[in-house]
């Protein structure tokens, strides 16, 4: 993922999002400026301000862009079998990001600002709620179909997200190459122990 969070570009807004991604990756949040984004965009700062009044407006839109890309990839999971769907969702959360270390860094940079910027925290909160909803839904489906144990699906979804968030942070802060791999295995072990107890005996 050398260039951007997505392989396609359509329109100036998408181009600006790609430029923002590259600038954030290169300079980090603290040193990110509209000028540096414009340099990556290949146009003047006025061209960016035509679409976004402030840097915070732009970065809020960038978060929407990144999170929408994630939702698009999740929607590609077509199977309705609960066990397979849960595995694929966990892969999207913990396997796919292994090839996108720079994106993990960019997202962590943005997340670090969430306590101070409500617009950022709102977007991260909405994304977390969305992912937990997906996990909770597939777990509930598995319970109904008798392939998962009768558990508190909300608690299990929160536990899985704790594994995901911890692994992503370790992968960035400690540059631990095995963090995501370890977390993926841990998630499987947790699923087997909690959702499939009959298979763990």
Image: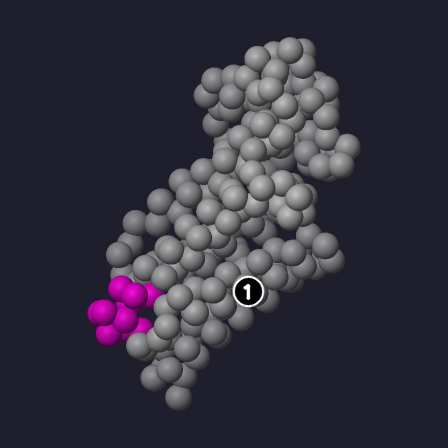
Residue 102 seen in this snapshot: no
Is 195 situated above or below 22? Answer: below
Coordinates of residue 172 in the picture (x, y in percent)? 69, 52
**For the stretch drawn in magenta, what is the main secondary structure?**
helix
Q: Which residues are magenta?
A: 139-148
**Residue furthest to the right:** 31
Left or right for 91, reference 153: right
Asked if residue 145 lies in the magenta stretch, the reply is yes
Position above or below: 34 against 94? above
Place of residue 84 in the rendered image (x, y in percent of width and height, measured from the top left): 34, 61
The quarter in which the N terminus is drawn is top right
Q: Is residue 12 left or right of residue 41?
A: left
Q: Which residue is mark 1?
A: 163
Closest to the observer: 189 or 65? 65
Q: Is residue 16 visible?
A: yes
**Outermost residue to the left:** 145
The picture places residue 87, in percent across and down from the top left corner, at 40, 61
Q: Position of residue 5 (x, y in %)?
A: 55, 36
């Amino acid at each position: 993922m050398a260039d951007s969070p997505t392989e396609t570009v359509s329109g100036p807004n998408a181009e600006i999002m790609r430029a923002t991604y590259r600038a954030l990756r290169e300079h980090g949040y603290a040193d990110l400026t509209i000028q540096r984004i414009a340099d990556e965009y290949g146009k003047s700062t006025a061209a960016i301000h035509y679409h976004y009044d402030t840097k915070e407006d732009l970065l809020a839109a960038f978060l929407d862009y990144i999170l929408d890309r994630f939702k698009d990839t999740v929607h590609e999971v077509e199977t309705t079998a609960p066990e397979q769907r849960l595995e694929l969702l966990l892969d999207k959360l913990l396997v796919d990001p292994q090839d996108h270390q720079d994106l993990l860094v960019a997202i962590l940079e943005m997340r670090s600002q969430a306590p101070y910027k409500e617009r950022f925290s709102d977007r991260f909160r909405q994304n977390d709620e969305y992912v937990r909803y997906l996990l909770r839904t597939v777990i509930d489906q598995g319970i109904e179909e008798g392939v998962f144990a009768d558990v508190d699906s909300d608690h299990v979804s929160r536990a899985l997200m704790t594994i995901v968030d911890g692994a992503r942070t370790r992968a960035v802060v400690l540059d631990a190459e095995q963090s995501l791999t370890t977390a993926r295995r841990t998630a499987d072990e947790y699923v087997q122990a909690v959702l499939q107890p009959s298979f763990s005996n």
